Amino acid sequence: MGKNSTRYIAFLRGMNVGGHRVRMEDLRALFAALSFTNVDTFIASGNVIFTAAGTPTADALEKQIEQRLRDVLGYAVATFLRTPAELVGIASSVPFPASDVAVAGHNTVHVGFLRRPPDAALATHLTDLNTTYDTFGVGAREMYWLCRGKTTNSLVKWPAVEKALRLDVTMRNLTTVRKLTEKYPA
């Protein structure tokens, strides 16, 4: 990686769900066509790892990627960029007790990537949505969801969560985030 280059992980919203299917080799080619290098994908849910040369901001890169995906795919794909170092921070800043997170095969933690930091009102609103089954927390530019059991049994009304966010969000399982930090260290 060059001196003036940055590695990013792009989290794409709605990739390979809801009838929008994109082969990973096609997704890699789309990113390579934007002059990104070291392009790779991680599982088929819209996680793209790449290196960007120069000094463009993450916001500018998100807009560039979103425009390219809209032009080629014909629909909007919200894009959220994080560096490997940011992912390490996200994975280590889970706002739930380790005893709740460590219940393998039962409890799951999901990370919702946001464009900007959640404000105090959003944090309060998410806390108001907590149930005995579901607990929410916030991070720097993330929301966290602890689900105590199968996500299909969640008591949360997701339209209420999306309305509360007033932001685009894409969710990933914490296990995926941790595997990305292992595969692409900071």
Image (spheres, grey):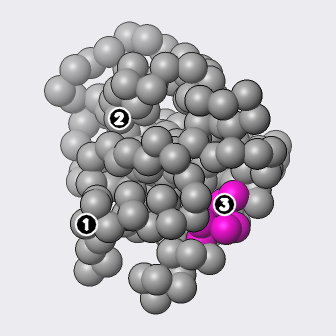
Q: Are marks 3 and 1 in contact (CB under 8 Å)?
A: no
Query: Regarding mark 2 in the picture, which secondary structure is present there?
Result: helix
- Amino acid type for the residue under numbered disc 2: Thr
Position in image of residue 114 (x %, y %): 64, 51
Which residue sits at x=35%, y=47%?
Answer: 41
**Mark closer to the observer (2, 1):** 1
Residue occupied by mark 3: 62
Q: Secondary structure at mark 1?
A: loop
Mark drawn on residue 46: none
Three-letter residue code for mark 1: Arg
Q: Looking at the image, which residue is at 53% across and 81% down?
A: 70
Pointer 2: what residue? 176
Residue visible at 50% across and 66% down in the picture? 33
Q: Nearer the viewer, residue 78 or 165?
A: 78
In the displayed image of the protein, which residue is found farthest to the bottom?
74
Q: Are marks 2 and 1 in contact (CB under 8 Å)?
A: no
Residue under label 1: 23
Cα gap from disc 3 to disc 2, whole angstroms:
21 Å
**Cα–Cα gap, marks 2 and 1:** 19 Å
